[in-house]
Image (spheres, grey):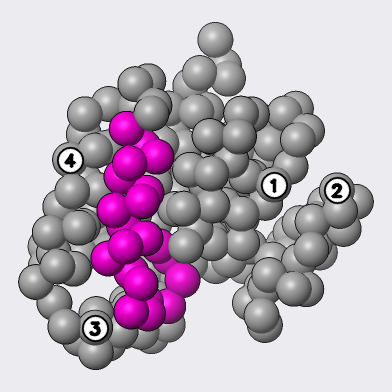
Amino acid sequence: MTVTEMALYERLAGLLDHPREDIKLKTDECIKVLAQFPQYTAEVGDEMRRFQKDIEEMPLDDLQGVYSYTFELSADFSLDMGYHLYDGFKRANNLSLIKSMYRDNGFPFDEIAKGELPDHLPIVLRFMGFSKDAALIKSFREDFVIKAMEKLHKNFDKTTRNPYRHLIGAIYRIIDKDVKEEVK
């Protein structure tokens, strides 16, 4: 994974953090980094620009409310990716495995997580940008991340007026393309 690829995953993760005053600047930066990746379809760029347009027109307080309502109060849109795949013991086991993977790879989970679970999408994206182990990231993406993202993306497909549907759509398409490239 190149430095630019690592930067892209970090930028995407930053857009999924609770929005602050710098959300518009972060979106601009992410779109600029994304422009360095011709392998991603024009649809990815279109989704990012739609997200950018939607948040440009929205006061920060409103965007924070949309974020909280979407990701913190609705299970269908949870950023805790394991929720979309597992229940009970299987989910707990998966969380433990992910946390062990982070620890074994020197990923500073405790510093980054700030109380979130190991399968929280911004943390997962940061790990994928952090790790230099291409085989591990390939396996993680194929076996877990894309499957959860597919379900989250489908849940967002049912919404029409949520700016985050565009961001999730872009992230899903990026990861889907990365998985398909790895399979070749």
**Three-letter residue code for mark 4:** Asp
- Compared to residue 171, the image places residue 89 above or below, namely below
How many residues crowd mark 4 within 10 Å: few (<14), some (14–19), many (20+)? Answer: some
- Residue under circle 2? 105
**Three-letter residue code for mark 1:** Phe
- Residue under circle 1? 130
Tell me the mark number nearer the camera, choosing from 1 and 2. 1
Q: Where residue 103 appears, x then y in whole percent?
A: 87, 58
Instruction: Please give left or right for residue 37 compared with residue 84 in the image.
Output: left
Identify the mark nearer the N-term, 4 or 2.
4
How many residues crowd mark 2 within 10 Å: few (<14), some (14–19), many (20+)? Answer: some
Tell me the mark number nearer the camera, choosing from 2 and 3. 3
Q: CA distance from mark 4 to mark 1?
A: 26 Å
Q: Quadrant of residue 142?
A: top right
- Residue under circle 3? 60
- Residue under circle 4? 46
Identify the mark nearer the N-term, 4 or 1.
4
Q: CA distance from mark 2 to mark 3?
A: 36 Å
Instruction: Please give left or right for residue 139 compared with residue 153 in the image.
Output: right
- The kind of secondary structure element at disc 2 is loop
